[in-house]
Amino acid sequence: VDQTYIMVKPDGVQRGLVGEIISRFEKKGFKLTGLKLFHCSKELAEEHYKDLNQKSFFPKLIDYITSGPVVSMAWEGVGVVASARKLIGATDPLQAEPGTIRGDFAVQTGRNIIHGSDSPENGKREIALWFKEGELC
Ligand code: ATP
Ligand code: MG
């Protein structure tokens, strides 16, 4: 079964969108296997987004992700990685379709409220990075 790592970013938590986001994944039919709220370190954010560390926006991205608590989630289900990306919508919320999470709730790429793993391999890598084994069901 596939697994994906979903994170509600600090702006999504501050704006009270955690329940709405969890609800969309639950209603779709995926299984929640891990959930926690915490303020992540700069080191963890940098490791999570290491593939982007040469980009000009990288320092701003790290400041954004560490600007407040995030909600970390692990979700399981057949096809969950690609399906979660569809539920989330395009990186630029102005390009994201209405009905998607970013399309419905965001306007700026730099404040796009949610992360989802982009491949099954990264899903496994990110869940191992953000959770300890005893924290997953
Ligand atoms: P995520 O990995 O957070 O799910 P994504 O896979 O849609 O988003 P990536 O290309 O992996 O997009 O970029 C990671 C994050 O970096 C984006 O979600 C966004 O917050 C930020 N980002 C990407 N491109 C830009 C940009 N041009 N300017 C500012 N921030 C950006
Ligand atoms: Mg990405």
Image: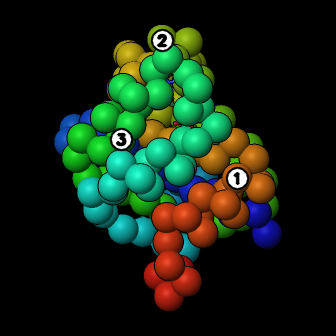
Q: Badge 2: few (under 14), some or many (20 or more) residues near its Cα, within 10 Å?
A: some
Determine the CA span between mark 3 and mark 1.
18 Å
Say which element carries label 1: helix
- Which mark sits nearer the N-terminus, 3 or 1? 3
Q: Is residue 6 above or below residue 90?
A: below
User: Residue 123: percent from the left, percent from the top?
Assistant: 67, 56
The kind of residue tagged 2 is: Leu
In this picture, residue 79 sits left or right of residue 131:
right
Q: Is mark 1 within 8 Å of ligand 2?
A: yes
Tell me what residue is drawn at x 70 percent, y 52 percent: 122
Mark 2 vs mark 1, foreground winner is 1
Q: Nearer the viewer, residue 11 or 102?
A: 11
Tell me what residue is drawn at x 53 percent, y 50 percent: 47
Tell me what residue is drawn at x 55 percent, y 12 percent: 95
Q: Name the image quarter holding the N terminus.
A: bottom right
- Which mark sits nearer the N-terminus, 2 or 1? 2
Residue for badge 2: 94
Say which element carries label 2: loop
Q: Badge 1: few (under 14), some or many (20 or more) residues near its Cα, within 10 Å?
A: some
The answer to the question of whether label 2 and label 3 lie on touching residues, with beta carbons closer than 8 A, is no
Residue for badge 1: 122
The kind of residue tagged 3 is: Ile
**Ligand 2's quadrant:** top right
Residue for badge 3: 65
The kind of residue tagged 1 is: Asn
The answer to the question of whether label 3 and label 1 lie on touching residues, with beta carbons closer than 8 A, is no
Q: Name the image quarter holding the C terminus.
A: bottom right
Q: Is residue 84 visible?
A: no
Determine the CA span between mark 2 and mark 3.
20 Å
Q: Is residue 85 above or below residue 29?
A: above
Q: Badge 3: few (under 14), some or many (20 or more) residues near its Cα, within 10 Å?
A: many
